Image (cartoon, rainbow, N blue to C red):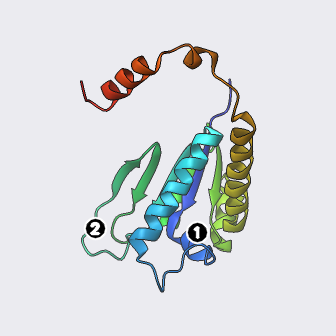
Amino acid sequence: MAIQEYLVVDGYNVINAWRDIFDLSKEPLEDCRERFLSMLSNYQGYKNIQVLVVFDAHLVKGGTERVENYDKLTVVYTKENESADNYIERFVYKMAEEYRIRVATSDYLEQRIILNVGGIRMSSRELKEEIFSVTKNNKRTSQDNQGKTNTIMSNVSPELLKRLEDMRRGKF
């Protein structure tokens, strides 16, 4: 049986650590969060792993835990008085026996706790390097394949391609 892998990301911790990508003094946090989720979604598609992103909402008065989907990412906003660290620790503790779980955070104490409960630590810098490496390699592969014809699509008439595209867009 193949071991399924999870990448669990402390969202705000990583966004704050990537100061060369996210400038919170000039860009709204919501925009940074959206770009970050988009980057992780692309990465997840290349790596074919489960990605769980946890954002702190522990200082939000009356806040309740919220779980959303962003493409195929699972995004969690913690409840009032629960930090992302608490949520991540609990998740790793429950799931580490069944899954390989890497946790991306720059919080040294959190990394130590994750190791103790069965997870694999990954710094924010390591995550950034891996995302950019995977993206760069896949772009290079895509460029290498440009110009090669897809024999199935090369046999479809332009009229049929247009009709199929219209159907895909809901224009019958």
Identify the element where label 2 is drawn. loop
Q: Earlier in the sequence, mark 2 or mark 1?
A: 1
Seen at 72% across and 34% down, the residue is 145
Tell me residue 162's x, y (percent): 39, 25
Q: Amino acid at mark 2?
A: Gly
Whether residue 60 can be seen here: yes
Q: How many other residues sit within 10 Å of disc 1, few (<14), some (14-19) or many (≥20)?
A: many
Seen at 42% across and 69% down, the residue is 31
Looking at this view, is 108 or 105 the one in front?
105
The answer to whether residue 2 is left or right of residue 91 is right
Q: Which residue is mark 1?
A: 14
Q: Amino acid at mark 1?
A: Val
Tell me residue 47's x, y (percent): 65, 41
Residue 161 lies, with reference to residue 117, above or below; the image says above
Q: How many other residues sit within 10 Å of disc 2, few (<14), some (14-19) or many (≥20)?
A: some
Seen at 58% across and 45% down, the residue is 44
Whether residue 115 can be seen here: no
User: Residue 63 bears which disc, if any?
Assistant: 2
Q: Quadrant of residue 16?
A: bottom right
Identify the element where label 1 is drawn. helix
Residue 162 lies, with reference to residue 39, above or below; the image says above
Tell me residue 14's x, y (percent): 58, 69
